[in-house]
Amino acid sequence: MTINPNWPYIAVIAGLLAAAYAGLIAWLNNHRRHGTFWGAHAWLEVVIGNSLIILTLWALAGREAALLVFGLNAIWGAPMVITTLLANMRRLERAVDQAGADAIARRSIQ
């Protein structure tokens, strides 16, 4: 495995993209209308961030290294994404059940 001779340029471009991506994530999570969605789906931000890391590795060290890291991300990341999705679904289900219980309680009081 050899490192790309243009690695300083790749590193600077990757750093600028990383800063822009971090700003986008901060803006999305603090957005007045869509912040709740992105807070509940932060796993998407992590997957995109890891994909950007893999693309940088591809530019620096080649396809084989990038595929190796992609495989490791899939092995370690898939269970975490599934767990996060299940937790979000359970949280939403509890909120819907609570809203239904509150509506029934209000009707019975009247």
Image (cartoon, rainbow, N blue to C red):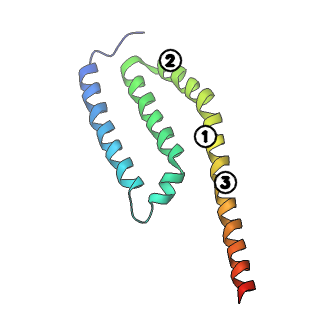
If you read the primary sequence from the N terminus, does the residue marked by circle 1 or circle 2 appear first?
Answer: 2
Q: Nearer the viewer, mark 1 or mark 2?
A: 1
**Residue 6 location in percent, x, y?**
26, 19
* Numbered circle sitting on residue 89: 3
Task: Give x and y (percent) for residue 95.
Answer: 65, 63
Could you tell me which secondary element the residue under label 3 belongs to? Answer: helix
Q: Residues within 10 Å of mark 3 (few under 14, many from 20)?
A: few
| Disc 2, SS | helix
Depth check: give the residue in front, 108 or 52.
Answer: 108
Q: Is residue 44 left or right of residue 87?
A: left
Q: Closer to the camera, 11 or 99? A: 99
Q: At x 42% / y 34%, what residue is drawn?
A: 52
Q: Earlier in the sequence, mark 2 or mark 3?
A: 2
The residue that mark 2 highlights is 64
Residue drawn at the location 65% of the way across and 41% of the way down: 83
The amino acid sitting under disc 3 is Met
Pointer 1 or 3: first along the chain: 1
Q: Amino acid at mark 2?
A: Glu
Contact, mark 1 vs mark 2 (Cβ under 8 Å): no
Query: Which residue is denoted by mark 1 in the rendering?
Result: 81
In the rendered view, would you say 23 is above or below 99? above
Q: Nearer the viewer, mark 2 or mark 3?
A: 3
Gap between marks 1 and 3 measured at Cα: 12 Å
Q: CA distance from mark 1 to mark 2?
A: 25 Å
Mark whose residue sits in front, 1 or 3: 3
Residue in the picture at 55% in, 28% down: 73
